[in-house]
Structures are given as structure tokens and as C-alpha cells.
Image (spheres, grey):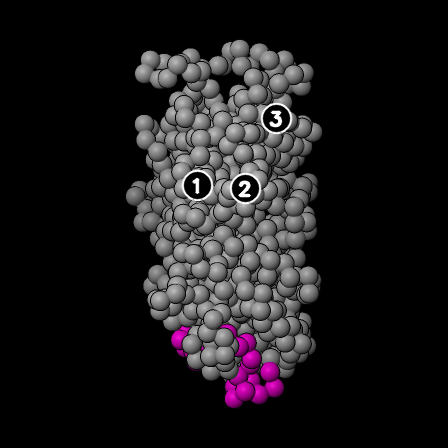
């Protein structure tokens, strides 16, 4: 039998190795058990149209530069400075319930390839490839090796991508698939603010709630490329992999290289189902309870910036505790000489003048109040004034004959040098000895520059070295949680989440921006593993002045934190913050186990999200007015079918934000009402009237009568 199937959740992948050629003959809804797979290629094989070579056109499982295929090659290699023609043929295949491994060889080209697919109960598949240079005497130069090559379902006609810039990441763009290639990628050394390494393809008009959708994302934090090409066999094909510099990957005789994994999932119920699949995937992979106890953070950055010392930080810890925080994170500025962005980065010694006793007294004081303690670090970087930069200029990335390139007035350490690893590890060990932090906010505030180009480090090796470094820190200090931050969201990717406990998706705490950032990040990441903080008004990044209640409510959508100056708060604002931090603490376990149902937009500028926990029948409906109303009456909204067959008590938790009307329903004024889920699903509810920038939070709890 030449056909093999792999099932993941409600989806099935079928590969055909007939004639020793690998082809993908089905990717879609789960097929019935016992289905005769041999019928699939009989019914779906593609004819060869006029204008093509005299060769069979097929949905190739891994096209290469074989001299005849017009598909975009998933392997591009050179030998002896010439493009290498490769006719890879299946030499072995191994199928289990949860994996498919196919080995392909070309003896003449001296290349062996292993394509591996894995499935998970969540519905998420993974794919990766390994290339081996089987030559006995010549190098193999690999210019491109796709971690994933897929033929998209023929009904998929559009693709959505997410990109942006600092403090406004994950903006979405949708494009029709046509007779041309579409490509996104990064050569910045990190996944970048500009291009989230993810593509979502679907049927025309696909949405959060409707139609067939496929999402693919690369589990990689460095240079990447994802592209979609017209396929000679059927519709379009998708590839994802590491973006390599020319000459970056050279395999000696007998040497092999394994690509990072790509993850993908399918849904017939819109993007919300993709979100649920990826949430279950990560919770199973990292531990189902990882998000259940998420302490409320207080981060010192936007209250102090670089202007702080031991006394002011002790006072800030007291203020954070009074607002309901459960973890205090001391951000940038605690190191010797660190008074602005251009100084004091790299030695990681507490400032003797401002913190004469180190950071230990801060940690002790925080813990005496019941708070855990965290510290900001950026160990991949140095500034030129530090001891490490003066003593080890050879550790700084540069190209011979050229001056090093700074970013944010700092320089990049060569993580591929073993002594650099040891220096960073010793600095972190010293920090642990000083204050024993529970949490590290690991930042990376600049792109790579001059990495590669024949020097001692390549972009791929630098990313891999970061993974190794984080793994070593975790092995030495297993009780420390680590957050991945990179000037906000420049290292928000599946590779970073695989290494860390939390991801910071943006430096913007503007709640209108944050709602969309969280919505788009949630396609790949569980909400509880994404940090989201209550910021100041006006916003430090967008300048928007928005109600504190809105800022608090939107912060419930992830791992909640506070990042503002308590001295600038009124008594009423302090009370509001205490109210919502207490609410988060009471609801966080339910939120961690809930599914997120983003409702299809029925009015421009009105964003709706139902967060619903099927296990305890508790729900929160978020109604956000992100643009000025266009009509006097707010719309009636029907809730998803998950609420059917249940009776609820329904209550608007913040009626003070919806009181700009002459008359309104009792429940719009805060009265609790009993209602059936069937009515909410079939008929719906009239949303409260909200002014621009306001958010209503409607709670559903099971009716006990």
C-alpha cells in the first residue's frame, strides 16, 4: 500500500508514495475510518494541460529542482558552485498513529532527505525536514529547505497575513490568491515587528466564525520566509522555512541539517476553531495548568523609566501591592551606569550608588508583602561604555573592515562564542544569588546587523544559540519563569513560546490597539501566555486618552499586569484598579480554561468577543466601541452556539460606562436578569449604547434555579 493517512483532531492528511514519488493527495476534514484511500488519487489526479512538459502533473509532496517540475522547489542546493539537479525518490516510509516519516534519495546528486509529519489530538500538525549530504568528497550548499510544503485546499482563494511596526504590531492584510506568488519574511535576525511568521488561507469571505481555513506558522525566532505559489497541479501551494543567506548553510560530506518545525491546522468553522486548536496544542505541550495561576504583574517601566533607586523602588512595591499586584518586575535602569539607553548595558551589576545593597532588599520586601519578584534583562546586548565591551571587543558582532552597527545605541554580542555564553550565564547566576528572582523579563531591543557574511556567526546559528542559552538558564534555575520580549513584539513567534513561559506581543498598551493585537496573536498563542497590561492615559505610544475601565477590561484578555505611575492616580482610579485586579484574580482560572469566540463584525467599529468556559458555564462578553457610532441604535448580537441548552444569570458589570442614554433596559443599568442560552443564541441581545473608547463587560453565570 503506497498511501498513508495521518489524523489530527478533526483533520486528515493523506500522502501517496506510489511510483516512489511523494505526493499529497488529501488535506481536509477527517476521513471515515476504513475508507479506501486508493480511491482518492483515482478521483483527484490532475491532467497535464497544454503548454506543459510531457510529464505527469501531480500535487508534489516535496518538489525539487529536478529539471522538469514547474512548482517552486522546496529544496534549493548547489554543489561545486552550480545549481544541483535533484530527482528525489521515496526510498522508505514509516507510518505510525501519530507520525509519518518519508525518506527520499537521489544517489546521483548525493542527497538524502527526510520529511516528517506529526499529529496531535488538538488538531495541530507539525512538519520538518532533514537534508543529508551523502557525498564522500564535496560540500553541499543549501540555499532553501522548506520546513513545510503543502498543497492548499482548492477552495482556498484568499490569504491573510499580520505585520506592522513597533507598538503597532499584527495589523492584518487580506489578499486574493491569483496567478502570482505571495511572500512574507524577515532578514532582521528575529521574527520582527514587520512580519509575523504566519499565514492564514481560506475560502472567500472566511471569518472568525465561518468557512474553511488553514493556518501555518513557523516555530522559529529568526530569519524566515513563507510563500504561496500557484500550483501546476491544484490551486496553490504553501511553503515555510528559514531564510538563509547565500553560503550560510554548507554541509560537509556526511553532514546533515534539520529544519525547525512548522505548525499547521485546519478548520471548517472559521479562525476561532484554529484558535482553540492551537490553545490546546500549547497547553498539552507546556502543561495544562501553565496559565491557571498567573500573578498580576506590576512592571516598573512606565512609572519610573531610568529614574529610580532603592528607596523609590521600595515605595513603588508598596504602591503596587496596594493596587492588587502579585508580582513586582523591576524593569530597565537598575544596572551600574544605566541612566539612559546608551549606557550601562552588559555588565549586569546593580548600581552601587542607587542600589548599594543590590536588589536583594527589594525582593525581600516584595515577598514580605506576598508579591513575587522579577527583573528585566537584555543579555544579548552591550553598550560601548561597559567593562565587558572594553575587555572583549571581539565579542561584539561586526564585519571585518567595517564599524559595528548600533541599534538603540547598543551592540550585539556574538552568541556563537562559548565564552559569551559563559559570561551571560555567570551574570544571571550572580543576579540569582543577589535577589533570587522568580521571573526574568528577557528583552531584545534591536535587529541583527552584520551577522553572517562569512564571519564567525550566521543568522541561523545566532537564533539557535539563543535557544541554547535560554535552555541553559532554565536548566540552572528551573523555578524562574521567563518572558520573551523584543522591543514589544519583534520576537513573538512559536519558537520563542517553545522556550519561554510568556510572550510580550507589543509595547502598546492602548486598549483599542491591544484588542486587535491580542485577537491576532491568539490565532497561534493561548491568551493566558500573552502579557497585557493596564497603561496610562494618554498612552505612552499612541497618545490616546481612553477610560481606565476600558484599559482594565482589555487587560483581562491575557496575563494581566499594571504599568503606570501610581503617584499620578486619583483615589477613584486606585479604586477602579483594585476592583479589576480583584476581578481578574477571581476569574483567572476560569479565563485560563475558556475558549475565545471572536464574533464576526456586524457594525464597523464595534468589536465583540465571548470568552466562554464550557466546563463551568461561565462567560464574559466584551463589547468594545473602537470607532464612533454610525447609528443611534446599538445592534442586536446573537451569541455562538456554545451557550445553547444552558440557563444563565446575566449582568452588565460596568453600567457606568453605558449610561449615556435617556432610558434603557434594566440590565443595561446593572440589574441581573435570568435568560436562556437558546435565546441568546437564536435571538440575541441588544448591546449597551457605548461612546467611543468605552467597553462593556457582560457576565454570564449558570442559573442555579
Does residue 353 belong to the magenta stretch? Answer: yes
Q: Position of residue 155 (x, y in %)?
A: 43, 23
Which quadrant is the C terminus positioned in? Answer: top right
Residue at position x 55%, y 76% in the image: 348
* Mark 3 crowd level (few <14, some 14–19, many ≥20, 10 Å Cα): some
Name the residue carrying label 2: 137
Q: Which mark is residue 324?
A: none
Q: Position of residue 510 (x, y in %)?
A: 40, 59
Q: Choose mark 3 or mark 2, whichever is in front.
A: 2
* Mark 2 crowd level (few <14, some 14–19, many ≥20, 10 Å Cα): few
Q: CA distance from mark 3 to mark 2?
A: 23 Å
Q: Is residue 64 above or below residue 581?
A: above
Residue at position x 40%, y 56% in the image: 453
Residue 178, image quadrant: top left
Precedes in sequence: disc 3 or disc 2:
3
Q: Which mark is residue 80?
A: 1
Could you tell me which secondary element the residue under label 2 belongs to? loop
Name the residue carrying label 3: 91
Q: Is residue 182 above or below residue 329?
A: above
Magenta segment range? 338-358
| Residues tagged 3 and 2 counted as in contact (Cβ below 8 A) | no
Could you tell me which secondary element the residue under label 1 belongs to? loop
Q: In terms of secondary structure, what is the magenta stretch mainly?
A: loop
Does residue 598 belong to the magenta stretch? Answer: no
Amino acid at each position: 500500500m503506497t498511501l498513508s493517512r495521518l489524523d489530527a483532531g478533526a483533520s486528515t492528511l493523506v500522502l501517496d508514495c506510489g511510483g516512489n514519488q511523494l505526493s499529497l493527495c488529501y488535506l481536509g476534514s477527517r476521513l471515515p475510518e476504513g475508507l479506501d484511500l486508493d480511491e482518492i488519487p483515482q478521483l483527484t489526479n490532475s491532467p497535464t494541460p497544454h503548454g506543459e512538459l510531457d510529464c505527469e502533473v501531480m500535487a508534489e509532496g516535496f518538489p525539487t529542482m529536478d529539471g522538469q517540475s514547474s512548482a517552486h522547489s522546496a529544496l534549493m542546493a548547489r554543489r561545486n558552485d552550480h545549481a544541483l539537479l535533484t530527482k528525489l525518490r521515496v526510498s522508505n516510509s514509516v507510518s505510525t498513529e501519530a507520525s509519518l516519516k518519508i525518506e527520499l534519495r537521489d544517489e546521483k546528486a548525493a542527497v538524502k532527505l527526510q520529511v516528517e509529519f506529526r499529529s496531535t489530538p488538538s488538531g495541530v500538525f507539525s512538519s520538518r525536514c532533514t537534508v543529508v549530504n551523502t557525498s564522500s568528497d564535496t560540500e553541499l550548499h543549501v540555499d532553501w529547505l522548506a520546513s513545510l510544503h503543502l498543497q492548499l485546499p482548492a477552495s482556498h482563494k484568499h490569504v491573510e497575513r499580520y505585520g506592522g511596526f513597533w507598538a503597532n504590531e499584527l495589523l492584518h492584510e487580506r489578499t486574493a490568491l491569483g496567478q502570482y506568488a505571495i511572500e512574507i519574511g524577515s532578514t532582521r535576525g528575529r521574527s520582527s515587528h514587520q512580519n509575523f511568521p504566519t499565514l492564514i488561507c481560506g475560502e472567500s469571505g472566511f471569518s472568525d466564525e465561518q468557512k474553511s481555513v488553514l493556518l501555518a506558522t513557523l516555530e522559529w525566532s529568526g530569519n524566515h520566509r513563507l510563500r504561496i505559489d500557484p500550483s501546476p497541479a491544484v490551486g496553490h501551494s504553501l511553503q515555510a522555512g528559514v531564510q538563509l543567506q547565500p553560503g550560510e548553510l554548507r554541509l560537509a560530506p556526511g553532514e546533515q541539517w534539520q529544519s525547525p518545525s512548522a505548525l499547521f491546522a485546519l478548520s471548517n468553522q472559521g479562525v476561532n476553531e484554529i484558535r482553540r486548536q492551537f490553545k490546546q496544542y500549547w497547553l498539552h505541550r507546556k502543561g495544562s495548568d501553565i496559565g491557571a495561576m498567573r500573578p498580576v504583574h506590576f512592571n516598573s517601566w512606565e512609572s519610573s523609566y531610568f529614574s529610580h533607586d532603592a528607596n523609590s523602588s521600595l515605595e513603588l512595591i508598596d504602591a503596587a501591592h496596594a493596587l492588587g499586584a502579585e508580582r513586582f518586575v523591576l524593569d530597565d535602569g537598575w544596572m551600574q551606569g544605566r541612566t539612559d539607553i546608551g549606557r550601562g548595558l552588559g555588565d549586569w551589576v546593580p548600581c552601587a550608588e542607587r542600589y548599594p545593597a543590590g536588589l536583594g532588599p527589594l525582593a525581600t520586601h516584595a515577598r514580605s508583602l506576598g508579591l513575587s519578584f522579577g527583573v528585566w534583562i537584555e543579555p544579548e546586548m552591550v553598550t560601548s561604555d561597559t567593562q565587558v565591551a572594553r575587555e572583549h571587543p571581539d565579542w561584539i558582532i561586526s564585519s571585518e573592515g567595517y564599524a559595528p552597527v548600533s541599534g538603540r545605541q547598543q551592540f550585539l554580542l556574538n552568541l556563537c562564542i562559548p565564552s559569551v555564553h559563559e559570561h551571560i550565564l555567570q551574570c544571571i547566576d550572580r543576579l540569582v544569588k543577589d535577589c533570587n528572582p522568580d521571573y526574568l523579563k528577557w528583552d531584545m531591543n534591536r535587529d541583527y546587523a552584520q551577522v553572517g557574511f562569512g564571519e564567525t556567526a550566521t543568522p541561523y546559528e545566532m537564533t539557535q544559540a539563543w535557544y541554547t542559552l535560554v535552555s541553559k538558564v532554565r536548566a540552572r534555575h528551573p523555578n524562574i519563569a521567563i518572558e520573551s520580549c523584543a522591543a514589544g513584539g519583534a520576537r513573538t513567534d512559536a519558537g520563542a513560546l517553545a522556550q519561554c513561559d510568556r510572550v510580550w506581543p507589543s509595547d502598546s498598551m492602548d486598549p483599542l490597539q491591544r484588542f486587535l493585537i491580542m485577537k491576532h496573536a491568539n490565532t497561534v498563542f493561548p491568551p493566558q501566555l500573552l502579557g497585557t497590561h493596564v497603561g496610562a492615559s494618554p498612552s505612552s505610544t499612541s497618545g490616546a486618552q481612553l477610560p481606565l475601565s476600558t484599559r482594565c477590561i482589555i487587560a483581562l484578555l491575557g496575563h494581566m499586569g499594571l504599568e503606570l505611575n501610581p503617584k499620578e492616580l486619583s483615589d477613584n482610579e486606585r479604586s477602579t484598579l483594585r476592583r479589576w485586579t480583584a476581578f481578574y484574580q477571581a476569574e483567572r482560572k476560569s479565563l485560563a480554561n475558556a475558549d475565545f469566540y471572536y464574533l464576526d463584525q456586524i457594525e464597523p467599529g464595534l468589536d465583540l468577543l465571548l470568552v466562554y468556559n464550557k466546563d463551568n458555564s461561565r462567560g464574559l462578553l466584551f463589547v468594545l466601541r473602537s470607532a464612533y457610532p454610525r447609528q443611534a441604535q446599538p445592534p442586536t448580537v446573537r451569541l455562538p452556539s456554545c451557550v445553547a441548552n444552558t440557563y444563565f444569570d446575566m449582568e452588565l458589570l460596568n453600567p457606568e460606562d453605558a449610561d449615556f442614554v435617556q432610558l434603557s433596559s434594566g440590565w443595561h443599568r446593572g440589574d441581573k436578569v435570568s435568560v436562556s442560552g437558546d435565546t441568546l443564541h437564536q435571538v440575541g441581545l441588544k448591546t449597551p449604547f457605548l461612546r467611543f473608547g468605552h467597553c462593556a463587560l457582560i457576565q454570564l453565570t449558570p442559573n442555579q434555579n
